[in-house]
Image: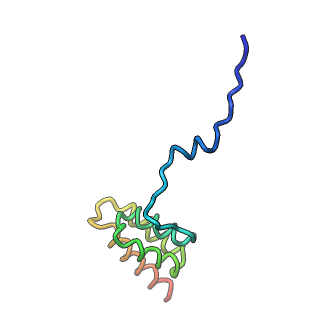
Amino acid sequence: MTKTINQPTLLSDILAKYEVKKDGKYISQEFQDYGYRLAVDLDDLAHKSLYIRLAKTIPRAVLEAARAFAVDASQARSRARMFMWKMKEIRSRVKV
């Protein structure tokens, strides 16, 4: 019996499996990526620019605590509203 050595997969073969979006919108900063992922988690892509701005201006710990609260709330009618309410509550406690 002879052993066959597996040839490594070419990078071009791996990249050929993925489609590149042609809409011309790119994420170049980390806060943009976080804001977009936040909008996806809250199922509110219509307001993704708001979440990107929040990711740029508000401390990440506040956003992450509010996101965790909103995502875990299974009975919420709107996770986005739950997130905004919790973020306001956390920010008011931090300032006091």
Toward which corner of the image does residue 40 lie, by quadrant?
A: bottom left
Residue 89 sits above or below residue 46 on the image: below
Image coords of residue 47 (percent x, y): 36, 73
Q: Residue at x 37, y 76 (%)?
A: 84
Image coords of residue 53 (percent x, y): 47, 79
Number of numbered markers: 0
Q: Which quarter of the rendering shows the N terminus?
A: top right
Q: Nearer the viewer, residue 85 or 27?
A: 27
* Colour mapping: rainbow
Q: Residue at x 29, y 67 (%)?
A: 78
Q: Nearer the viewer, residue 50 or 24?
A: 24
Image coords of residue 12 (percent x, y): 61, 44
Residue 19 sits above or below residue 71 on the image: above
Q: Residue placed farthest to the bottom in the image?
A: 96
Q: Residue placed farthest to the top in the image?
A: 1
**Residue 42 relative to residue 32: left or right:** left
Image coords of residue 63 (percent x, y): 48, 73
Q: Residue placed farthest to the left in the image?
A: 77
Q: Residue at x 54, y 74 (%)?
A: 60
